[in-house]
Amino acid sequence: MVTTNGRRAAHSNRSFPLPSTIISKCSLGFILSWWIGCLYLMSSFIGCSQQNDTIATSDLLVRTTIAKDAAVPVQSTCQAEYNRIVSQQTPGLTPQDLLRSRALIGNQYRLEKLMEKLSSRERPVIVVVAGGSISLGHGLANPDQHRYSNRLENWMNEMYPLPQEPKTDQDNNNNNEQQRHKVINVASHGADSCSMAKRLNVMYSDLASKLPSSSDEPDLIVLEFAVNDYEGQDHLVQVRYQASVFFDGFMDITLCSEVVIYSLLKRYKNTAIVFLEMQTAILPRKTGALLHMGVATHYQIPVISYAETLFHGFAELIRKLEKMDPISYSFLPSELVFGSKENNVTTSALFPYPHGCSPCQPQNIVSQFRHGGCKSICTFVDRSNIVNDRKLKCKANDIKSGRKECFVPYLAPDAVHPSAVGHGIATDLLVHTLASAQRNSCEGEGSSYQNELPMTTFVAKTTNELEVRGDFLVVNDAARIFSRWDRLKPIGKPQGFERYADDSLKQRPGWIATDPSGGSKIIFPIDLPPSECYVVYVAILKSYAGMGTMMVEVRDYGNEKNDSELPKHSTKKKVDALWQSPISVWNDVQITDDNIAGCTGYCEVDITTDPTVSGRNGNKVKILTVSARRCSRGQT
């Protein structure tokens, strides 16, 4: 007796699934032999499938059986190649870790074509890494050796070496390099999605001079902006990480991410793009993963999550330590578990390596920070401000005798920047993504079409908005962002403004005024070819305390200014650097309008601070960037 859903009746003591279509077409004698095994059943009934075209043989079954004309199964050879190219993986990473890293599969077509190019070994493959200080390898003693971008380059050249022509004496004299796959790192301290969106033209120009003659576009672009898109650049003593997810600037950052993806897909027709999502050990701190996921889903861009791979058990590690020692989050030496000597797995406690507590490796920390050693779980918890009922003691001399501090191996000098191990794992996840794309294609399960630009936008109002926001003509910065630096230089001597860095690491300078009485003044030029209309922006620090207001005036002279010439047009806008969101980030303020010709060639941006607003505890104004793009009016 058979039920309508193809399973044996309830009174039977067997529960294996049996397709009803097979029963309806095949004899009862075959059914009696069914429990010998599902594989035997399918092979015995293969003739029955011809009687009903709804019975489809599993593609997986075909690929795990030996073909009539082949000595080796297809899946076997594909899996063998996968195993070969991921053979340098960090010890301890599990299949579950790698599965977690694939936050969004997206369209794999471009990745599969990238792997075809690598496998063909016909020309150098070029990868571009765009990101912040994480991608720069901040804190690493030997970034050129340990940074994930360098490791990825070494992996490509080791696994897919290019054929080399014998060197001649002339080659040696000219210092001609042998052909190599290359990773071009255009990362910069503090860079985020909006930084890249405004500087796409700068990046295009820079890459054009670095790409080999065999290609006019990179093969892969890795975007690492998750941390910086929410990091902020706090000018206060302590960053307030309790910012709401959807803070005032959330939509702006999302739009920047869409501008980047849209622009790259449109310019580079064959380039693969992936998001690499990192994470910090400060628990309340948000990242841009949420907004990136929305953009990535809309444009079918693969997302690789370092955060999901390593931080899914981070809170549980903290809980375990808290039960053992709620004051210093230490553990007993008896908790240490030694890994296999054969695989040279580092010692780990409480959880298997690399998820547990492991000894600090100070030799891999840059000398500038080495004296501070690795930061412990206790330090991360303390800086997260999540413990309010007791005072934590996180210094080494506060740890009780016989106990050990807990350091996670993927972090070292601080809560943000990966250690050498962390960079190795980031490389592993990139390699796993590439190797998986190749394996799927090898097994006949690859993407059947290339992802093109979608028919609608994500958060932008129109595609024209994406076009103009990805085509800035002037971007003058107070600090270097990406490879080329067009300096933000004032006209004459500023009054009350000075250029300096007000963040704790002294990495983010700007033109700053703090006079409580106001009246500080600075003027910047914008010199563009005479045109119908340009839109002018001023990027400022926006924060939740200590900030002031300013009047920004754009004076348009059209052609080059003469001393006696009056401006053709003037646009004034009152700008407030204070907002309610408890986060400090740079924010682009549009001064002139798309529908009014506020700047038509040469114009000047005049910024004057106001007196301190009543009730505020400061009057800081920080100018970071002055930029301009074409107006979008009249375009479709």
Image (tube, rainbow, N blue to C red):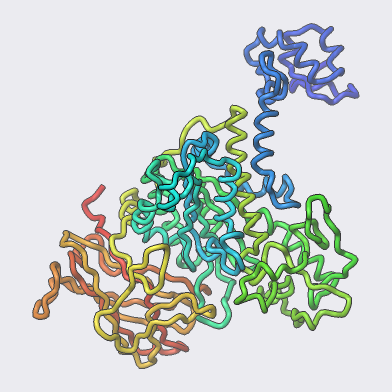
Q: Is residue 26 left or right of residue 632?
A: right
161 or 170, which is in the foreground?
Answer: 170
Residue visible at 40% across and 46% down in the picture: 212
Point out the residue furthest to the left here: 564
616 or 347, which is in the foreground?
Answer: 347
Locate residue 223, reporting x and y percent. Answer: 50, 54
Q: Quadrant of residue 514?
A: bottom left
Q: Quadrant of the N terminus?
A: top right
Locate residue 540, reporting x and y percent. Answer: 39, 74
Is residue 459 visible from the viewing direction of this image? no
Q: Is residue 472 left or right of residue 78?
A: left
Q: Is residue 322 left or right of residue 614?
A: right
> Above or below — where is 90 with respect to 63?
below
Q: Is residue 68 left or right of residue 495?
A: right
Locate residue 515, reporting x and y percent. Answer: 38, 91
345 or 529, which is in the foreground?
Answer: 345
Residue visible at 34% across and 50% down in the picture: 462
Residue visible at 67% across and 78% down in the picture: 372
Point out the residue furthest to the front here: 169
Is residue 80 visible from the viewing direction of this image? yes
369 or 53, which is in the foreground?
Answer: 369
How many circles with numbers are drawn on the protein? Answer: 0
Residue visible at 89% across and 76% down in the picture: 402
Q: Quadrant of residue 82?
A: top right
Locate residue 315, reporting x and y percent. Answer: 73, 63
